[in-house]
Amino acid sequence: GSGIPFGTIMIMSGKFKTGKTSLSLHIAKKAQQQNRKVFFQDIEVRLKKRDIEGIKDLDPNKIEVIVSSAGNILSAEKQLQITEKLVKSEPGCIIIMDSISQLYAEKQMSEDLGKGGRDSKFLLLSDFCKRIEAPLRINGCIIIMTIIMAQNGKNTKQEQ
């Protein structure tokens, strides 16, 4: 009942360490109670077992965590491709992308430090949102994106 409408993208922003991940996991628990599949894209590579275990009645065996690993660093493009595939193949699922602040395009990942151009993640996200708009609505999925909000117009420690 009520809450986040299916077929939508929700962006949750806040300063570093303000509970965005915890709130996302509470939403995941509610989704599990409705027998919906839950996917957690740990873009920051910060999710800990205690974070999941700290949410009463959240079943850790029913949440699929997608995270980079040694030899398989997921670029922004790969993360968004995974999300698109889930939206198209897992009707009614909940996808948590924590945090889109840490998405890095393949081009940025391969360039020498200091020689990169403008951050292209927002252009990639814009294209991605347009591309999945119809499948998201048709399949009734929810995407929750967290983003670290800058403090006083300056980047947070995480974004530096």
Image: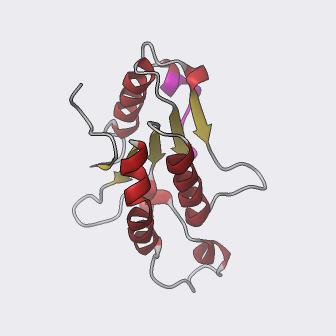
Q: Is residue 14 left or right of residue 157?
A: left
Quarter of the image for residue 116 reads bottom right
* Residue 115 vs residue 126, the one in the foreground: 126
x and y percentages locating residue 21 in the rendered image:
40, 37
Tell me if residue 93 comes above or below residue 114 in the rendering.
above
Q: Residue at x 50, y 85 (%)?
A: 117
Q: Residue at x 35, y 53 (%)?
A: 148
x and y percentages locating residue 81 in the rendered image:
58, 59
* Residue 34 vs residue 144, the one in the foreground: 34
Tell me if residue 12 comes above or below residue 56 in the rendering.
below
Q: Is residue 6 left or right of residue 97?
A: left
Tell me if residue 116 comes above or below residue 2 in the rendering.
below
Identify the residue at the far top of this view: 57
Q: Is residue 2 left or right of residue 103?
A: left
Q: Is residue 45 highlighted in magenta?
A: yes
The answer to whether residue 59 shows anywhere in this view is yes
Tell me if residue 33 comes above or below residue 67 in the rendering.
above
The quadrant of the picture occupied by the N terminus is top left
Magenta stretch? Answer: 43-52
Identify the residue at the far front of this view: 138
Q: Residue at x 44, y 36 (%)?
A: 92
Q: Main secondary structure of the magenta part?
A: loop
